[in-house]
Amino acid sequence: MPVPTIKYYVREGLLPTGELTSPNQASYSDVHERRLRLVRALLEVGGLSVSSIRDVLLAVDDPDRSLHKVLGAVTDRLVPRYEAAGEAPAAAREKVEELIARRGWAVDGDHPAALALTEALAALERVGHGAFAEVLDDYAAAAEAVAAADVAHVGRRLGRDDLVESVVVGTVVGDAMMAALRRLAQVDRSARAFDGRE
Amino acid sequence: MPVPTIKYYVREGLLPTGELTSPNQASYSDVHERRLRLVRALLEVGGLSVSSIRDVLLAVDDPDRSLHKVLGAVTDRLVPRYEAAGEAPAAAREKVEELIARRGWAVDGDHPAALALTEALAALERVGHGAFAEVLDDYAAAAEAVAAADVAHVGRRLGRDDLVESVVVGTVVGDAMMAALRRLAQVDRSARAFDGRE
Protein backbone atom coordinates (compact mmCIF):
# COMPACT_ATOMS: atom_id res chain seq x y z
CA MET A 1 0.00 0.00 0.00
CA PRO A 2 1.70 3.24 -1.12
CA VAL A 3 2.34 5.76 1.69
CA PRO A 4 0.88 8.75 -0.25
CA THR A 5 -2.44 6.88 -0.53
CA ILE A 6 -2.53 6.30 3.23
CA LYS A 7 -1.65 9.97 3.86
CA TYR A 8 -4.45 11.01 1.49
CA TYR A 9 -7.00 8.90 3.37
CA VAL A 10 -5.81 10.34 6.71
CA ARG A 11 -6.02 13.89 5.34
CA GLU A 12 -9.58 13.26 4.10
CA GLY A 13 -10.61 11.94 7.51
CA LEU A 14 -11.23 8.40 6.24
CA LEU A 15 -8.49 6.88 8.37
CA PRO A 16 -7.22 7.84 11.84
CA THR A 17 -3.54 8.82 12.05
CA GLY A 18 -1.16 6.02 12.93
CA GLU A 19 0.79 5.99 16.16
CA LEU A 20 4.08 7.87 15.69
CA THR A 21 7.02 5.57 16.45
CA SER A 22 9.62 8.09 15.23
CA PRO A 23 9.32 11.58 13.66
CA ASN A 24 9.08 10.00 10.17
CA GLN A 25 7.37 6.72 10.89
CA ALA A 26 3.88 5.80 12.00
CA SER A 27 2.77 2.36 13.05
CA TYR A 28 -0.60 1.00 12.01
CA SER A 29 -2.54 -1.53 14.06
CA ASP A 30 -4.89 -4.31 12.95
CA VAL A 31 -7.82 -1.94 13.46
CA HIS A 32 -6.18 0.52 11.08
CA GLU A 33 -5.55 -2.18 8.55
CA ARG A 34 -9.16 -3.34 8.62
CA ARG A 35 -10.38 0.23 8.19
CA LEU A 36 -7.95 0.75 5.33
CA ARG A 37 -9.33 -2.33 3.54
CA LEU A 38 -12.89 -1.09 4.06
CA VAL A 39 -12.07 2.37 2.67
CA ARG A 40 -10.43 0.85 -0.40
CA ALA A 41 -13.42 -1.42 -1.00
CA LEU A 42 -15.83 1.52 -0.74
CA LEU A 43 -13.68 3.67 -3.01
CA GLU A 44 -12.34 1.21 -5.59
CA VAL A 45 -15.02 -1.47 -5.77
CA GLY A 46 -18.08 0.53 -4.70
CA GLY A 47 -17.07 3.71 -6.54
CA LEU A 48 -18.29 5.89 -3.62
CA SER A 49 -17.20 9.51 -3.29
CA VAL A 50 -14.99 10.58 -0.37
CA SER A 51 -17.89 12.39 1.28
CA SER A 52 -20.16 9.33 0.91
CA ILE A 53 -17.46 7.20 2.49
CA ARG A 54 -17.29 9.61 5.43
CA ASP A 55 -21.04 9.17 5.96
CA VAL A 56 -20.76 5.40 5.74
CA LEU A 57 -17.93 5.32 8.28
CA LEU A 58 -19.93 7.51 10.70
CA ALA A 59 -22.71 4.92 10.47
CA VAL A 60 -20.28 2.01 10.92
CA ASP A 61 -18.80 3.66 14.02
CA ASP A 62 -22.14 4.60 15.59
CA PRO A 63 -22.64 2.10 18.43
CA ASP A 64 -26.36 2.93 18.62
CA ARG A 65 -27.00 1.84 15.06
CA SER A 66 -28.02 -1.77 14.42
CA LEU A 67 -26.03 -3.71 11.87
CA HIS A 68 -29.05 -3.74 9.55
CA LYS A 69 -29.13 0.09 9.59
CA VAL A 70 -25.39 0.25 8.95
CA LEU A 71 -25.76 -2.03 5.94
CA GLY A 72 -28.64 0.14 4.71
CA ALA A 73 -26.38 3.22 4.92
CA VAL A 74 -23.88 1.60 2.58
CA THR A 75 -26.08 -0.46 0.21
CA ASP A 76 -28.45 2.46 -0.47
CA ARG A 77 -25.43 4.03 -2.19
CA LEU A 78 -24.73 0.97 -4.34
CA VAL A 79 -27.95 0.87 -6.35
CA PRO A 80 -27.39 1.23 -10.10
CA ARG A 81 -30.12 3.45 -11.53
CA TYR A 82 -31.69 2.86 -14.88
CA GLU A 83 -31.53 6.17 -16.78
CA ALA A 84 -34.64 8.14 -15.88
CA ALA A 85 -36.45 9.97 -18.69
CA GLY A 86 -38.78 12.16 -16.69
CA GLU A 87 -40.93 10.94 -13.82
CA ALA A 88 -41.93 7.29 -13.91
CA PRO A 89 -45.66 6.82 -14.52
CA ALA A 90 -47.90 5.90 -11.59
CA ALA A 91 -48.56 2.49 -13.18
CA ALA A 92 -44.88 1.50 -12.86
CA ARG A 93 -44.77 2.68 -9.24
CA GLU A 94 -47.89 0.67 -8.46
CA LYS A 95 -46.45 -2.47 -10.06
CA VAL A 96 -43.39 -2.24 -7.81
CA GLU A 97 -45.47 -1.65 -4.68
CA GLU A 98 -47.69 -4.59 -5.52
CA LEU A 99 -44.66 -6.80 -6.11
CA ILE A 100 -43.13 -5.85 -2.73
CA ALA A 101 -46.43 -6.63 -1.01
CA ARG A 102 -46.85 -9.90 -2.92
CA ARG A 103 -43.35 -11.08 -1.96
CA GLY A 104 -43.87 -9.97 1.66
CA TRP A 105 -40.61 -8.00 1.57
CA ALA A 106 -39.96 -5.75 4.58
CA VAL A 107 -38.85 -2.78 2.46
CA ASP A 108 -40.16 0.72 1.74
CA GLY A 109 -41.71 1.54 -1.63
CA ASP A 110 -39.39 4.57 -1.85
CA HIS A 111 -36.17 2.62 -1.26
CA PRO A 112 -33.56 3.57 -3.92
CA ALA A 113 -33.75 0.04 -5.35
CA ALA A 114 -37.55 0.29 -5.61
CA LEU A 115 -37.12 3.54 -7.54
CA ALA A 116 -34.50 1.91 -9.79
CA LEU A 117 -36.92 -0.94 -10.50
CA THR A 118 -39.72 1.56 -11.20
CA GLU A 119 -37.48 3.31 -13.72
CA ALA A 120 -36.64 0.03 -15.44
CA LEU A 121 -40.36 -0.80 -15.76
CA ALA A 122 -41.05 2.71 -17.05
CA ALA A 123 -38.28 2.25 -19.65
CA LEU A 124 -39.91 -1.01 -20.81
CA GLU A 125 -43.23 0.79 -21.29
CA ARG A 126 -41.53 3.63 -23.15
CA VAL A 127 -39.99 1.31 -25.76
CA GLY A 128 -43.21 -0.68 -26.15
CA HIS A 129 -42.07 -3.74 -24.18
CA GLY A 130 -44.24 -3.40 -21.09
CA ALA A 131 -45.17 -7.08 -21.51
CA PHE A 132 -41.67 -8.06 -20.33
CA ALA A 133 -42.89 -7.21 -16.81
CA GLU A 134 -44.57 -10.64 -16.86
CA VAL A 135 -41.17 -12.10 -15.83
CA LEU A 136 -41.10 -9.96 -12.63
CA ASP A 137 -42.10 -12.72 -10.23
CA ASP A 138 -39.65 -15.22 -11.71
CA TYR A 139 -36.92 -12.62 -11.32
CA ALA A 140 -38.03 -11.79 -7.77
CA ALA A 141 -37.92 -15.46 -6.74
CA ALA A 142 -34.39 -15.73 -8.21
CA ALA A 143 -33.38 -12.52 -6.41
CA GLU A 144 -34.58 -14.01 -3.12
CA ALA A 145 -32.39 -17.09 -3.60
CA VAL A 146 -29.39 -14.94 -4.49
CA ALA A 147 -29.96 -12.59 -1.53
CA ALA A 148 -30.21 -15.54 0.84
CA ALA A 149 -26.80 -16.77 -0.40
CA ASP A 150 -25.39 -13.23 -0.07
CA VAL A 151 -26.60 -12.78 3.50
CA ALA A 152 -25.43 -16.26 4.52
CA HIS A 153 -21.97 -15.47 3.13
CA VAL A 154 -21.51 -12.09 4.82
CA GLY A 155 -23.14 -13.28 8.06
CA ARG A 156 -20.01 -15.32 8.76
CA ARG A 157 -17.95 -12.15 9.19
CA LEU A 158 -17.51 -11.04 12.77
CA GLY A 159 -16.39 -7.38 12.98
CA ARG A 160 -18.50 -4.59 11.54
CA ASP A 161 -15.70 -3.32 9.28
CA ASP A 162 -15.17 -6.79 7.84
CA LEU A 163 -18.86 -7.36 7.35
CA VAL A 164 -19.48 -4.01 5.68
CA GLU A 165 -16.45 -4.52 3.41
CA SER A 166 -17.77 -7.92 2.45
CA VAL A 167 -21.21 -6.47 1.67
CA VAL A 168 -19.74 -3.77 -0.58
CA VAL A 169 -17.64 -6.24 -2.57
CA GLY A 170 -20.39 -8.86 -2.75
CA THR A 171 -23.02 -6.33 -3.82
CA VAL A 172 -21.00 -4.70 -6.59
CA VAL A 173 -19.11 -7.71 -7.96
CA GLY A 174 -22.22 -9.85 -7.41
CA ASP A 175 -24.17 -7.72 -9.92
CA ALA A 176 -21.46 -8.35 -12.54
CA MET A 177 -21.43 -12.09 -11.72
CA MET A 178 -25.20 -12.33 -11.98
CA ALA A 179 -25.32 -10.49 -15.33
CA ALA A 180 -22.60 -12.77 -16.75
CA LEU A 181 -24.26 -15.94 -15.42
CA ARG A 182 -27.64 -14.85 -16.76
CA ARG A 183 -26.04 -14.46 -20.20
CA LEU A 184 -24.42 -17.92 -20.04
CA ALA A 185 -27.67 -19.55 -18.94
CA GLN A 186 -29.50 -17.68 -21.73
CA VAL A 187 -27.10 -19.09 -24.34
CA ASP A 188 -27.80 -22.58 -23.03
CA ARG A 189 -31.58 -22.11 -22.90
CA SER A 190 -31.62 -20.34 -26.27
CA ALA A 191 -29.75 -23.25 -27.89
CA ARG A 192 -32.39 -25.66 -26.61
CA ALA A 193 -35.30 -23.43 -27.67
CA PHE A 194 -34.14 -21.93 -30.95
CA ASP A 195 -31.28 -23.93 -32.45
CA GLY A 196 -33.44 -25.64 -35.04
CA ARG A 197 -35.65 -22.59 -35.59
CA GLU A 198 -35.10 -20.21 -38.49
CA MET B 1 -40.30 9.68 -34.94
CA PRO B 2 -38.41 12.73 -36.24
CA VAL B 3 -37.66 12.65 -39.98
CA PRO B 4 -33.94 13.60 -39.56
CA THR B 5 -33.47 10.49 -37.38
CA ILE B 6 -35.00 8.25 -40.06
CA LYS B 7 -32.83 9.92 -42.70
CA TYR B 8 -29.77 9.36 -40.54
CA TYR B 9 -30.57 5.63 -40.20
CA VAL B 10 -31.10 5.35 -43.98
CA ARG B 11 -27.80 7.18 -44.64
CA GLU B 12 -25.95 4.83 -42.27
CA GLY B 13 -27.42 1.80 -44.02
CA LEU B 14 -29.46 0.70 -41.00
CA LEU B 15 -32.79 1.18 -42.73
CA PRO B 16 -33.79 0.71 -46.37
CA THR B 17 -35.11 3.79 -48.15
CA GLY B 18 -38.88 4.19 -48.11
CA GLU B 19 -40.95 4.07 -51.27
CA LEU B 20 -41.16 7.54 -52.83
CA THR B 21 -44.79 8.61 -53.11
CA SER B 22 -43.89 12.14 -54.26
CA PRO B 23 -40.58 13.97 -54.71
CA ASN B 24 -40.59 14.98 -51.03
CA GLN B 25 -42.41 12.14 -49.37
CA ALA B 26 -41.52 8.52 -48.73
CA SER B 27 -43.90 5.90 -47.46
CA TYR B 28 -42.79 3.33 -44.92
CA SER B 29 -44.30 -0.12 -44.70
CA ASP B 30 -44.83 -2.38 -41.66
CA VAL B 31 -41.50 -4.06 -42.44
CA HIS B 32 -39.81 -0.67 -42.28
CA GLU B 33 -41.51 0.17 -39.04
CA ARG B 34 -40.41 -3.10 -37.41
CA ARG B 35 -36.83 -2.56 -38.59
CA LEU B 36 -36.94 1.00 -37.25
CA ARG B 37 -38.03 -0.24 -33.82
CA LEU B 38 -35.24 -2.83 -33.83
CA VAL B 39 -32.59 -0.24 -34.76
CA ARG B 40 -33.79 2.07 -31.98
CA ALA B 41 -33.70 -0.75 -29.44
CA LEU B 42 -30.15 -1.70 -30.45
CA LEU B 43 -29.00 1.92 -30.38
CA GLU B 44 -30.88 3.43 -27.45
CA VAL B 45 -31.42 0.48 -25.11
CA GLY B 46 -28.47 -1.73 -26.09
CA GLY B 47 -26.04 1.14 -26.58
CA LEU B 48 -24.54 -0.54 -29.68
CA SER B 49 -22.44 1.43 -32.16
CA VAL B 50 -23.71 2.00 -35.69
CA SER B 51 -21.17 -0.48 -37.10
CA SER B 52 -22.17 -3.13 -34.54
CA ILE B 53 -25.80 -2.59 -35.51
CA ARG B 54 -24.89 -3.13 -39.17
CA ASP B 55 -23.30 -6.49 -38.26
CA VAL B 56 -26.33 -7.51 -36.21
CA LEU B 57 -28.71 -6.64 -39.06
CA LEU B 58 -26.62 -8.68 -41.51
CA ALA B 59 -27.03 -11.64 -39.17
CA VAL B 60 -30.77 -11.03 -38.76
CA ASP B 61 -31.21 -10.88 -42.53
CA ASP B 62 -29.09 -13.95 -43.30
CA PRO B 63 -31.62 -16.71 -44.13
CA ASP B 64 -28.95 -19.40 -43.61
CA ARG B 65 -28.37 -18.47 -39.99
CA SER B 66 -30.42 -20.22 -37.31
CA LEU B 67 -32.27 -18.04 -34.84
CA HIS B 68 -29.92 -19.18 -32.08
CA LYS B 69 -26.92 -17.89 -34.08
CA VAL B 70 -28.68 -14.60 -34.75
CA LEU B 71 -29.37 -14.14 -31.05
CA GLY B 72 -25.72 -14.94 -30.32
CA ALA B 73 -24.64 -12.23 -32.76
CA VAL B 74 -26.59 -9.65 -30.79
CA THR B 75 -26.27 -10.83 -27.18
CA ASP B 76 -22.47 -11.27 -27.45
CA ARG B 77 -22.42 -7.49 -27.78
CA LEU B 78 -24.56 -6.91 -24.69
CA VAL B 79 -22.25 -8.41 -22.05
CA PRO B 80 -21.18 -5.90 -19.41
CA ARG B 81 -17.50 -6.46 -18.61
CA TYR B 82 -16.10 -6.15 -15.14
CA GLU B 83 -13.08 -3.84 -15.42
CA ALA B 84 -10.07 -6.02 -16.23
CA ALA B 85 -6.82 -5.32 -14.37
CA GLY B 86 -4.41 -7.38 -16.44
CA GLU B 87 -5.00 -10.96 -17.46
CA ALA B 88 -7.24 -13.01 -15.18
CA PRO B 89 -5.32 -15.76 -13.37
CA ALA B 90 -5.66 -19.34 -14.56
CA ALA B 91 -7.46 -20.24 -11.32
CA ALA B 92 -10.38 -17.93 -12.15
CA ARG B 93 -10.60 -19.31 -15.70
CA GLU B 94 -10.66 -22.84 -14.36
CA LYS B 95 -13.42 -22.02 -11.87
CA VAL B 96 -15.61 -20.74 -14.70
CA GLU B 97 -14.92 -23.78 -16.91
CA GLU B 98 -15.73 -26.12 -14.04
CA LEU B 99 -18.94 -24.25 -13.33
CA ILE B 100 -20.05 -24.46 -16.98
CA ALA B 101 -19.33 -28.21 -16.98
CA ARG B 102 -21.08 -28.71 -13.60
CA ARG B 103 -24.23 -26.93 -14.80
CA GLY B 104 -24.15 -28.80 -18.13
CA TRP B 105 -24.42 -25.53 -20.05
CA ALA B 106 -23.92 -25.78 -23.82
CA VAL B 107 -21.62 -22.77 -24.00
CA ASP B 108 -17.96 -22.14 -24.86
CA GLY B 109 -15.46 -21.29 -22.13
CA ASP B 110 -14.33 -18.28 -24.20
CA HIS B 111 -17.81 -16.80 -24.64
CA PRO B 112 -17.74 -13.05 -23.79
CA ALA B 113 -19.94 -13.72 -20.73
CA ALA B 114 -17.56 -16.43 -19.53
CA LEU B 115 -14.72 -13.92 -19.80
CA ALA B 116 -16.77 -11.32 -17.92
CA LEU B 117 -17.43 -13.86 -15.15
CA THR B 118 -13.72 -14.76 -15.06
CA GLU B 119 -12.85 -11.09 -14.61
CA ALA B 120 -15.36 -10.71 -11.77
CA LEU B 121 -13.83 -13.73 -9.98
CA ALA B 122 -10.33 -12.32 -10.56
CA ALA B 123 -11.47 -9.00 -9.06
CA LEU B 124 -12.75 -10.83 -5.97
CA GLU B 125 -9.36 -12.51 -5.53
CA ARG B 126 -7.56 -9.19 -6.01
CA VAL B 127 -9.43 -7.48 -3.17
CA GLY B 128 -9.07 -10.49 -0.87
CA HIS B 129 -12.66 -11.73 -1.20
CA GLY B 130 -12.10 -14.90 -3.20
CA ALA B 131 -14.31 -16.72 -0.69
CA PHE B 132 -17.35 -14.99 -2.17
CA ALA B 133 -17.07 -17.46 -5.08
CA GLU B 134 -18.80 -19.96 -2.76
CA VAL B 135 -22.12 -18.38 -3.83
CA LEU B 136 -21.47 -19.21 -7.51
CA ASP B 137 -23.76 -22.23 -7.71
CA ASP B 138 -26.61 -20.46 -5.94
CA TYR B 139 -26.22 -17.62 -8.43
CA ALA B 140 -26.01 -20.03 -11.37
CA ALA B 141 -29.23 -21.79 -10.32
CA ALA B 142 -30.97 -18.40 -10.04
CA ALA B 143 -29.58 -17.40 -13.46
CA GLU B 144 -31.05 -20.57 -14.98
CA ALA B 145 -34.51 -19.72 -13.62
CA VAL B 146 -34.24 -16.17 -14.92
CA ALA B 147 -32.97 -17.30 -18.34
CA ALA B 148 -35.85 -19.78 -18.64
CA ALA B 149 -38.32 -16.94 -17.99
CA ASP B 150 -36.46 -14.75 -20.53
CA VAL B 151 -36.50 -17.37 -23.27
CA ALA B 152 -40.15 -18.24 -22.62
CA HIS B 153 -41.04 -14.56 -22.94
CA VAL B 154 -39.18 -13.86 -26.19
CA GLY B 155 -40.17 -17.24 -27.66
CA ARG B 156 -43.70 -15.90 -28.10
CA ARG B 157 -42.52 -13.40 -30.72
CA LEU B 158 -42.97 -14.51 -34.29
CA GLY B 159 -40.83 -12.44 -36.67
CA ARG B 160 -37.06 -12.32 -36.37
CA ASP B 161 -36.95 -8.52 -36.05
CA ASP B 162 -39.53 -8.61 -33.23
CA LEU B 163 -37.75 -11.43 -31.45
CA VAL B 164 -34.31 -9.83 -31.67
CA GLU B 165 -35.72 -6.49 -30.49
CA SER B 166 -37.37 -8.23 -27.57
CA VAL B 167 -34.07 -9.98 -26.68
CA VAL B 168 -32.12 -6.70 -26.70
CA VAL B 169 -34.62 -4.93 -24.46
CA GLY B 170 -35.06 -7.90 -22.13
CA THR B 171 -31.33 -8.47 -21.81
CA VAL B 172 -30.35 -4.89 -21.02
CA VAL B 173 -33.34 -3.79 -18.95
CA GLY B 174 -33.43 -7.25 -17.34
CA ASP B 175 -29.95 -6.69 -15.86
CA ALA B 176 -31.16 -3.46 -14.26
CA MET B 177 -34.32 -5.19 -12.98
CA MET B 178 -32.33 -8.07 -11.52
CA ALA B 179 -29.85 -5.76 -9.76
CA ALA B 180 -32.71 -3.74 -8.24
CA LEU B 181 -34.64 -6.85 -7.17
CA ARG B 182 -31.50 -8.38 -5.65
CA ARG B 183 -31.07 -5.21 -3.57
CA LEU B 184 -34.71 -5.28 -2.39
CA ALA B 185 -34.49 -8.95 -1.46
CA GLN B 186 -31.20 -8.25 0.36
CA VAL B 187 -32.85 -5.54 2.47
CA ASP B 188 -35.56 -8.01 3.43
CA ARG B 189 -33.13 -10.86 4.21
CA SER B 190 -30.74 -8.49 6.01
CA ALA B 191 -33.55 -7.24 8.26
CA ARG B 192 -34.34 -10.82 9.26
CA ALA B 193 -30.66 -11.72 9.83
CA PHE B 194 -29.17 -8.57 11.32
CA ASP B 195 -31.87 -6.30 12.70
CA GLY B 196 -31.20 -7.20 16.31
CA ARG B 197 -27.45 -7.55 15.82
CA GLU B 198 -25.10 -4.72 16.80
Image: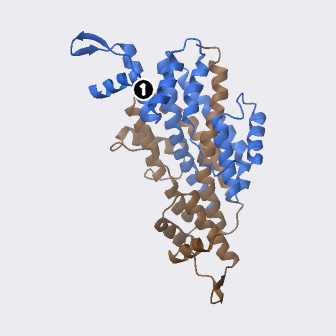
Chain colours: A brown, B blue
For the point 73% across and 55% down, the residue is B131
| Quarter of image, res A6 | bottom right
Left or right: residue A188 compared with residue A119: right
Q: Label 1 amino acid?
A: Val
Chain designation of label 1: B
Image spot of residue A194 (x, y percent): 62, 19
Asked if residue B2 shows in the view, the reply is no
Asked if residue A78 shows in the view, the reply is yes
Q: Nearer the viewer, residue A12 or A156?
A: A12
| Quarter of image, res A75 | bottom right
Left or right: residue B106 compared with residue A141: right
- In this rendering, is residue B151 above or below A33? above
Q: Quadrant of the N terminus of chain B?
A: top left
Q: Secondary structure at mark 1?
A: helix
Image spot of residue B173 (x, y percent): 49, 37
For the point 46% across and 52% down, the residue is A112
For the point 51% across and 61% down, the residue is A48
Residue for badge 1: B39
Q: Nearer the viewer, residue A196 or A103?
A: A196
